[in-house]
Amino acid sequence: MKILAKNKKAKHDYEIIETIEAGISLKGTEVKSAKDSKINFKDSFCKIEKGEIILYNIHISPYSGASIFNHDPERPRRLLLRKKEIRRLQSKVQQEGFTIIPLEFYVNEKGLVKVEIALAKGLKKYDKREKIAEKDYERRIRKQQKYENI
């Protein structure tokens, strides 16, 4: 499995509840550009519309080797999941205030581009501060233990 791109801000801005692997419907030049890791996750999210999950605001740069028949870099892209999974996600998003965000793009063993999406809950500003403080505290403890062992 080769990771093409990761959403680095996702774990900072959201509390990840559950992750799901989904296929993605891409055009030919998008696949080539994605395999070159030209993907930007800024402000990307998923919405459920008419029984389908649509991925918005993901930027896949146009493929440099293509002719005039290149794709729109920020077009909405359909994610491929089973109806049962989509219905379950839809009920959680509607009832409990969760959101669906993409975490990473990767190529699986068969050579297909896949997206890992997450059912997540947005963190408040004070939650983010607490998280940063905990990481800083753990980092200081590890550093102190390292010097004590020397």
Image (cartoon, grey):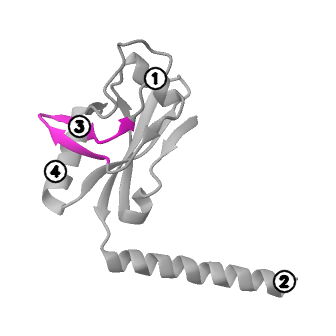
Mark 2 residue type: Asn
Mark 2 or mark 3: which comes first in sequence? 3
- The answer for how far apart the CA atoms under marks 4 and 3 are is 13 Å
Left or right of residue 65, residue 73 in this image? left
What residue did someone put label 4 on? 91
* Residue carrying label 1: 63
- From which residue to which does the magenta span run? 44-59
* Mark 1 or 4, nearer chain start: 1
Comparing 128 with 111, the one in front is 128
Label 1 residue SS: loop
Residue 84 image point, x, y percent? 22, 37
Question: Comparing marks 1 and 2, which lies closer to the viewer?
Answer: 1
> In front of the other: label 1 or label 4?
1
The residue nearer to you, when weighing 86 against 143, is: 143
Q: Are marks 1 and 4 in contact (CB under 8 Å)?
A: no
The residue positioned 39% from the left and 46% from the top of the image is 41
**Residue 86 in the figure: left or right of residue 130:** left
Task: Please tell me which of labels 4 and 3 falls first in the chain.
Answer: 3
